[in-house]
Amino acid sequence: MQWWFGITLWKRVLVGLVLGLILGLALRSGLGVDVAPDFADAWLKPFGDAFVRLIKMLVVPLIFTTLVAGVTAMGDPARLGGLGGRAIAMYLVTTWFAVSLGLAMGTIFQPGVGVEASAFGPAVDCSADPATMDSTVSQVCGRLNRAQGADSTIAQKLLDVIPTNPVEALAETNVLAIIFFAILFGVGCLLAGEKGRPIASAIEAAADVMLKVTVMVMELAPFGVFFLMSWIMAKLGLTILDNLGLLAIALYLACILHITLIYGLGIIKIILRLPLIRFFRGIADAQAVAYSTASSSGTLPVTIANVSENLGVKKSVAASVLPVGATINMDGTAIYLGLVALFAAQALGLPITPGMYVGVALAATLASIGAAGIPSAGLLLATVVMTEVGVPPEQAVLIIAFIFPFDRLLDMMRTMTNVTGDAAVATAVAKWEGELDEEIFRRPATV
């Protein structure tokens, strides 16, 4: 098996995708459209479900540990203000624009319309007597009623982020509340100084362990994709690829517009008054590595080199701002999460109210902060934003399974967007701090 693990993971996933597609279509053709779905549900879906459960298992510990570790990595509480504060503020503002753009593209393209909703399990009946509902269904209906109700205001959405019981939030996978508590906990570790250092070190170690566990689970991705793809093809056939194609087009177009309008024209050209083409030429290598590896963290050394050597950002700024960006600046992920939420709502036929758009925007902004800089990390957080439109957890997991075989293509563009944003914000902060050498910025790229 050494030869198998010697192949790059994304190539192995592609093999699983192709083989699963072939098997699913062969079953659909050989057994017929009436028998193949039942066979796939009985013999293929359980193996795919096992892989998806492994993914779901990672969400809460991965978010909490990596986010706390990202905050404590700042080292000095003073860095939360000044340089770090400016960077974080810009990251949050651009992320809000990103998710809004993703929601707009999802509304225009409507990639979920026409998807066979039965593939994601039976719909939840919220009209039933609450006394007859189990706890999970009751929670789902409660979320849906709050999302659609008159109390779905911005203030209420913000209030819902604050947990009354952090342990309960962890147990119920209330990810927004977990993110809020993790940020406060990380800041608390910094403010505690030396007394907080042992806890911070333990959580940083736990974050490293969780990233290794995630890598272990992702090694099973080719097999998970094989079973999930064969199940989807046997159940629904090739027509489902039309919807995924629309999802990919919407994501790529949203990312391109965000890179061009927000990073390029907005930050570099209008705010900083720097040459636009020169900026993109200067970070071309980082963009290429990001697109090919789908890892913001893996691209970080190249990003630092490009920004400091080609754009004239002092290394002290680049070394401070870019690692923070690789942790919390996930604009491509925010775009994707908003799109996935609308995709799920459209596929399940759920009504979308203005309050839901606010909830999805807030959820995607905060959830993207907790996305680890590793391939497909954003997909692990998709269940967060789906709950904002009333998607039950079980159906949310199935929708993730539905998209996962194609996620690599989407993740590559998301990551390139993230890295471009990191470079734009680092350039802006450097200029405001007087740490940008414009002579270097304006000369031809050397890397």
Image (spheres, helix red, strand yellow):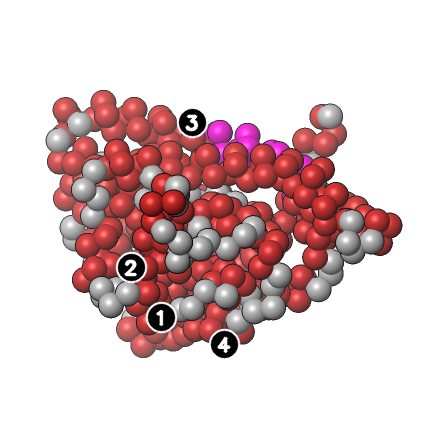
Sequence-wise first label, 4 or 2: 4
Sequence-wise first label, 2 or 1: 2
Q: Position of residue 393 (x, y in %)?
A: 45, 47
Against 376, residue 331 (above or below) is: below
Crowd rating for badge 3 (residues with CA inside 10 Å; few <14, some 14–19, many 20+): some
Whole-angstrom CA distance, mark 3 to mark 4, is: 41 Å
> Amino acid type of disc 1?
Thr
> Amino acid type of disc 4?
Ile
Q: Main secondary structure of the magenta part?
A: helix
> Amino acid type of disc 3?
Val
Task: State the residue position of label 3.
Answer: 209
Q: Check if mark 3's residue and mark 2's residue have beta carbons within 8 Å.
A: no
Mark 3 vs mark 1, foreground winner is 1
Q: Which portion, as a residue range, is magenta?
A: 212-225
Whole-angstrom CA distance, mark 4 to mark 2, is: 25 Å
Residue 146 got which mark?
A: 2
Task: State the residue position of label 4.
Answer: 108
Sequence-wise first label, 3 or 1: 3
Task: State the residue position of label 1.
Answer: 353
Magenta residue check for 216: yes
